[in-house]
Amino acid sequence: MPATNPGSFIRFVSGRWLGYYEQMRQRFPQEQTMEFADGMVRGDGLDMIGTFKIEGQYRHDGGIARVGWIKTYDGGHSVLYMGTFDGRWILGEWELSGHTDGFGFAPEHIARVEGSS
């Protein structure tokens, strides 16, 4: 359940996150490690395109937990991810060259129980 008052912060959990990105009405699996510390998020991962690194920021804004990062494929292009975290799932949109679509990620223990498709 989302935090509703500014004094109630949702904790971002470092570790393995599982989920998906959407493209052309299809969901594609993605897994990544995400390390949250001092307002920064870093990690790496794998999807059907290849391996990548992530680097970005997170913050609590008026009781909403916001997170954004850039996913850069090894030797390839970069994709911007922007979302909100409800304490279980980060949901939002990715953007590449003006095209946007959705995504969802949860810590591994939650994603395995609730599913990511």
Image (tube, rainbow, N blue to C red):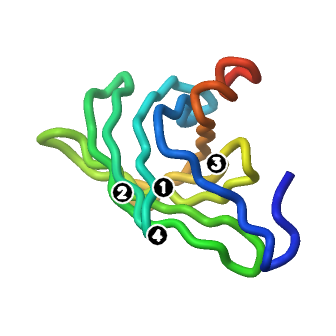
Mark 1 lies on residue: 81
| Mark 2 crowdedness (10 Å alpha carbons): few <14, some 14-19, many ≥20 | many
Which mark, residue 46? none
**Amino acid type of disc 3?**
Ile
Real-space Cα distance between discs 4 and 1? 16 Å
Real-space Cα distance between discs 2 and 3? 15 Å
Which mark, residue 90? 3
Residues tagged 4 and 2 counted as in contact (Cβ below 8 A) = no
Mark 2 lies on residue: 70
Q: Position of residue 39 (x, y in %)?
A: 46, 69
Q: Position of residue 56 (x, y in %)?
A: 39, 62
Mark 4 lies on residue: 39
Residues tagged 1 and 2 counted as in contact (Cβ below 8 A) = yes
Residues tagged 1 and 3 counted as in contact (Cβ below 8 A) = no
**Amino acid type of disc 2?**
Ile
Real-space Cα distance between discs 3 and 4? 16 Å
Q: With respect to residue 100, does 34 lie above or below?
A: above
Single out the mark in the foreground, 1 or 3.
Answer: 3
Residues tagged 2 and 3 counted as in contact (Cβ below 8 A) = no
Secondary structure beneath disc 1? Answer: strand
Secondary structure beneath disc 4? Answer: loop
Name the N-terminal-most of marks 1 and 2. Answer: 2
Q: Position of residue 97 (x, y in %)?
A: 37, 58
Name the N-terminal-most of marks 2 and 3. Answer: 2
